Amino acid sequence: MRAVTNIDNITLQITCDDKEEQREKLEGLIAFVEERDFLKVIRPQYAKKERDIKIRNKRNTIAKIGTGVYCAGKDMNGKKIVKHYIAIKFAGLSKYIKRLDSLSNNLLFSIAAYMNSHESIEYTLTAIDICIDLECRFEHMAVICTKHVSRSQYYELTEKQTYITTNNIERMSKAKLKRAALRSYFYYKTRKDKLDYPLSRYELKLNSKFLKTHGVKMDAIENALNRYHVMYFKDLAVKKTTIEEYTRSELDRQKKIDTLKLEDYRVYADINYIEHFLNVLFNLDEALLTVDRYDI
């Protein structure tokens, strides 16, 4: 089974020293986006409890821009250091809807090139979702976390979950999900996005806690991916037997992996693609960019 690696969600965060700098850089960013007549910037309606600025193409939201403050530590006198931020959030870079995917990726790389070309703009990656896509029905896919983290809980492979075509790997409360360094799940994308062919997706979410610690070091990202065995089973009877034996066995995880030959069913993310994507993102210069060009 051929596995396709994609980046789906991503958040870039600009750091500012004060509210005035935040306002200035936000207005500059909005002006840059508004140069594209096919995009519309919609400011939040606070009466409706909206907080994010939306970037839309017709009825489709391509990205959102949020602002806020955070404590960056304390100075020598114990006083809090307050920083302001602008968060640019892309949710859905690979929907398998060609026009929307092209618009989203083009805008992402255009904004990155804009920020890369302005030395006064300091930004970091604060969230990224790495996906492995398989052209198969949901039931042919299975994912096991084979390197557990202490104090974390995981769903049993045979355990029924809330949604029929979505399986979470980590068992977490909603509050803990927001604080987690990473988490993963897989789902039937055909059903979610109404595709006309079978497609299942595994998604590893690397959140701000992970990226603050590791940045975009590829060895850390690869180690995070390698904590999970993403597998495709052509024969559902073989899948059923394998999962039952894995769940029942009292051997340690590595011995179970070897005994059941789980590597025979495993699919991998394309590390070279992820590295290239990030290299382009952080190094693309505005002078090299054209309206319809991005190279990933």
Image: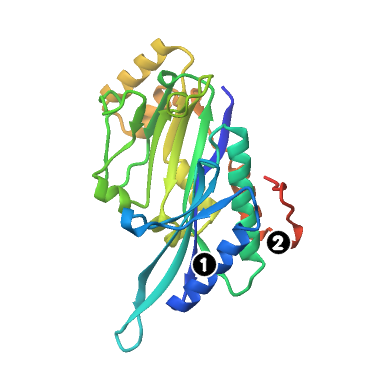
Q: Residue at x 53, y 56 (%)?
A: 217
Q: Is residue 246 left or right of residue 286?
A: left
Q: Which residue is mark 1?
A: 26
Task: Mark 1 vs mark 2: give the one in front.
Answer: 1
Q: Is residue 220 above or below residue 234?
A: below
Q: Is residue 216 left or right of residue 210?
A: right
Q: Residue at x 56, y 39 (%)?
A: 6
Q: Residues within 10 Å of mark 1 (few under 14, many from 20)?
A: some
Q: Which quarter of the figure is the C terminus placed in?
A: top right
Q: Which residue is mark 2?
A: 286
Q: Residue at x 64, y 63 (%)?
A: 114
Where in the figure is residue 243, as x and y percent of width and height?
Answer: 34, 21
Where in the figure is residue 88, as x and y percent of width and height?
Answer: 49, 57
Q: Secondary structure at mark 1?
A: helix
Q: Secondary structure at mark 2?
A: helix
Image-quadrant location for residue 169: top left
Q: Amino acid at mark 1?
A: Leu
Q: Residue at x 31, y 51 (%)?
A: 178
Q: Amino acid at mark 2?
A: Glu
Q: Is residue 22 above or below residue 136?
A: below
Question: Looking at the image, can residue 279 be seen?
Answer: no
Image-quadrant location for residue 35: bottom right
Looking at the image, tell me whether mark 1 or mark 2 is earlier in sequence order: 1
